[in-house]
Amino acid sequence: MWKLVLLSIVLEMLRRIKVINLTASTIAFGDDEGCIKIWDTRQLCCCNSFNA
């Protein structure tokens, strides 16, 4: 159940920000404040984040 909630939160975030598909299992997204996050789509977790 928690994975579905997390997935819905991530999908809502993805509608608002720029997304790049890095590999088959990772995506990167950035917001207007310059924060870039790398997500593992297999485990639904943030792998790394950067401030640009």
Image (tube, rainbow, N blue to C red):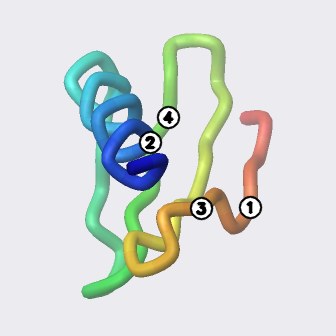
Residue 6: which numbered mark, if any? 2
Q: What SS does tag 2 mark?
A: helix
Q: What SS does tag 4 mark?
A: strand
Q: CA distance from mark 3 to mark 1?
A: 9 Å
Residue 48: which numbered mark, if any? 1
Relative side of 44 to 20, left or right: right
- Disc 3 target residue: 45
Relative side of 43 to 33, left or right: left
The x and y percentages for residue 37 are 61, 48
The answer to which of marks 3 and 4 sits earlier in the sequence is 4
Q: Residue at x 35, y 83 (%)?
A: 25
Q: Amino acid at mark 3?
A: Cys
Q: Nearer the viewer, residue 20 or 6?
A: 6
Q: Amino acid at mark 4?
A: Gly
- Disc 4 target residue: 30
Q: CA distance from mark 2 to mark 3?
A: 9 Å
Q: Amino acid at mark 2?
A: Leu
